[in-house]
Image (cartoon, grey):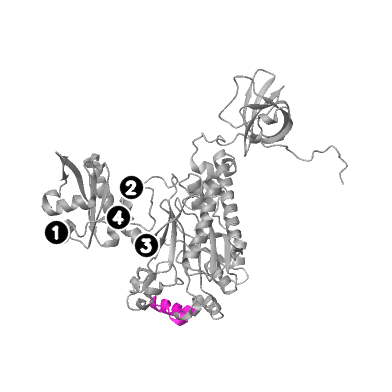
């Protein structure tokens, strides 16, 4: 037992960024890192001490041997800064610490880059020295914002009566479509666990088990190519409800998302819009529409029905109106045509809208092929005004919409992180998204999504026309997450499997543990999951989720901090009963 009655009860009494003029005259103790050290003569130094809350200027008399990023404890008296030295750029700019006693808690080598937001540091250096990078004010703000969002989500879920349950990370392979990470078993050599793409099947089993409302801030893993909005590891709010309608589930998710938005931004969004998948594709060319700007797709199929213009003789003809776009140069227009072709279109027609004594006309290589009636209807239907540019694609419906949807973002979009925040629910997705090489329907989401009750009678005769009871939440053109009402009846599940070419034997082999549970009283249920990384990135004003993840991977999947992935020692490989084979050339 210690008898040191003089030992301090705490290492610091305040945080650096919390000191104000109300503390003048107080003797306080701060701890942090040296952000900057400035000499004033031989016997006076100014040390800017930094912690996660901000910076405090400390006036030190005498010599003190400290450098950038040294870890210090400084005791001193709060005093107003002398006249003319106040710094309005920082919260503590009106005060400083005087009569300082400095204790060096740890020395530091010069950091690999400046620990501030002004330095333009390449990302590999930042990730290689992530422990230094995370000291920067922006990264501190981002990760603390993420913590605030997680807390708000948990409070919202708890308030709504959801029960938090942790599901396994070592799981059986699941049929969710994405490539899984496999974990070899030492005790069962030759067999593997899979790291979960999501807790999908586990949470459905929890519904069978009587947990009416489940949620989890879940860690999920998918072995997919990385990009700005995707990492191998990601975090999502995962929830499932029994005895709940689609509308009730979406209402719960909306509440959680708006609570998170309010915690992150201080402003609660007014509402979340809803549109069907068909409306989204028809008007915006994508099921992830960015509603921050208009520029909707315009249907010209009736205008050019029976046309003699070969370029428009297609099942679907749609256009985009670009206000003021007539100023684009010929080279810019040629680039636009090339962009459309790269997206799969056969070509792109463009029309500049002109005015002659108030009468609108068209400037285009195709204008001379239009009839007077077509030209008039074209101008009326597009709502064109002088100085506008109209671009047109004619092809199959889905391709036409997809190409124009991408061009819409190219021409009018802005970074996903820029405000305002525009949320939208997309509902009534197709149950199947095309067919495989054998002509079998392929599930658009997963094989356990309940078909729309109005479409059940077409499941066998016209499966591609069947809608699913599924729904996505989109924010500023990013898909935050997806959900659906699940199949809880064996007869419907068997019909869906049969349509996909999955017979009873294969169904039992792949999903027997779930189907077996459904025999014992599975309630109607549904759920949802949305990506917390993506949501926080938008709130933080970032266009890449790596900026809101403490230790992310690079786009090639490498961890520059640890060097992972790494080879395993031969002994461990032997214990696991595995060996590597040369990569096919």
Label the magenta part by its dominant secondary structure. helix
Measured Cα–Cα span from mark 3 to mark 2? 21 Å
The tag earlier along the polypeptide, 4 or 2, is: 4
Q: Quadrant of residue 444?
A: bottom left
**Who is closer to the viewer here, 88 or 573?**
88
Residue at the spot x=60%, y=52% of the render? 151
Residue extending furthest front? 270
**Who is closer to the viewer here, 100 or 467?**
467
Q: Which mark is residue 412?
A: none
Q: What residue does disc 4 label?
A: 403
Residue at the spot x=64%, y=22% of the render? 39
Callout 4 secondary element: helix
Q: Position of residue 496 (x, y in %)?
A: 42, 76
**Who is closer to the viewer here, 217 or 106?**
217
Measured Cα–Cα span from mark 1 to mark 3? 30 Å
Per the rendered image, the range of residues in magenta is 492-507
């Amino acid at each position: 037992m210690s008898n040191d009655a003089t030992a301090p009860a705490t290492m610091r009494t305040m945080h650096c960024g919390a000191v104000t003029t109300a503390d003048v005259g107080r003797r306080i103790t701060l701890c942090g890192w040296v952000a900057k050290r400035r000499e004033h003569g031989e016997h006076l130094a100014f040390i800017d001490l930094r912690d996660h809350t901000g910076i405090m200027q400390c006036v030190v008399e005498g010599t003190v041997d400290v450098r950038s990023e040294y870890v210090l404890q400084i005791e001193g008296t709060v005093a107003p800064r002398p006249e003319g030295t106040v710094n309005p750029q920082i919260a503590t700019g009106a005060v400083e610490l005087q009569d300082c006693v400095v204790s060096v808690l740890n020395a530091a080598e010069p950091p690999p880059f400046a620990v501030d937001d002004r330095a333009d540091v390449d990302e590999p250096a930042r990730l290689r020295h992530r422990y230094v990078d995370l000291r920067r004010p922006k990264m501190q703000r981002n990760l603390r914002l993420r913590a605030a969002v997680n807390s708000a989500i948990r409070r919202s879920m708890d308030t709504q009566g959801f029960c938090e349950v942790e599901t396994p990370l070592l799981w059986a392979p699941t049929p969710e479509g994405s490539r899984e990470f496999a974990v070899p078993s030492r005790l069962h050599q030759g067999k593997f666990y899979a790291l979960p793409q999501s807790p999908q099947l586990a949470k459905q089993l929890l519904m069978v088990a009587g947990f009416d409302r489940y949620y989890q801030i879940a860690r999920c893993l998918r072995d997919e190519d990385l990009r700005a909005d995707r990492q191998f590891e990601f975090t999502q709010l995962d929830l499932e409800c029994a005895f709940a309608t689609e509308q009730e589930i979406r209402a719960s998710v909306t509440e959680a998302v708006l609570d998170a938005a309010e915690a992150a931004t201080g402003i609660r969004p007014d509402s979340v819009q809803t549109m069907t998948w068909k409306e989204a594709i028809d008007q915006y060319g994508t099921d992830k529409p960015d509603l921050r700007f208009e520029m909707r797709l315009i249907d010209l199929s009736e205008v050019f029905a029976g046309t003699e213009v070969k370029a428009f003789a297609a099942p679907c003809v749609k256009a985009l109106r670009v206000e003021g776009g007539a100023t684009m140069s010929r080279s810019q227009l040629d680039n636009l045509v090339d962009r459309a072709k790269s997206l799969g279109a056969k070509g792109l027609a463009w029309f500049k809208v002109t005015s002659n004594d108030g009468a609108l006309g068209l400037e285009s290589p195709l204008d001379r092929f239009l009839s007077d009636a077509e030209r008039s209807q074209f101008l009326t239907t597009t709502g064109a005004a002088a100085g506008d540019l109209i671009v047109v694609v004619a092809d199959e419906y889905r391709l036409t919409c997809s190409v124009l949807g991408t061009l819409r973002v190219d021409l009018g979009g802005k970074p996903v992180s820029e405000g305002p925040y525009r949320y939208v629910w997309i509902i009534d997705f197709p149950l199947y998204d095309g067919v495989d090489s054998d002509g079998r329907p392929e599930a658009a989401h997963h094989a356990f999504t309940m078909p729309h009750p109005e479409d059940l009678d077409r499941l066998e005769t016209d499966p591609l026309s069947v809608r699913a009871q599924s729904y996505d939440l989109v924010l500023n053109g990013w898909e935050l997450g997806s959900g659906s009402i699940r199949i809880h009846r064996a007869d419907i599940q068997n019909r869906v499997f049969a349509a996909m070419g999955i017979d009873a034997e294969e169904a039992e082999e792949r999903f027997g543990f779930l189907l077996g549970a459904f025999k014992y009283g599975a309630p109607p249920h549904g759920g949802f999951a949305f990506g917390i990384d993506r949501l926080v990135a938008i709130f933080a004003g970032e266009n890449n989720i790596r900026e809101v993840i403490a230790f992310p991977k690079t786009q090639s999947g490498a961890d520059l901090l640890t060097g992972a992935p790494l080879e395993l020692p031969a002994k461990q490989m032997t214990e696991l009963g595995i060996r590597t084979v040369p990569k096919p050339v």
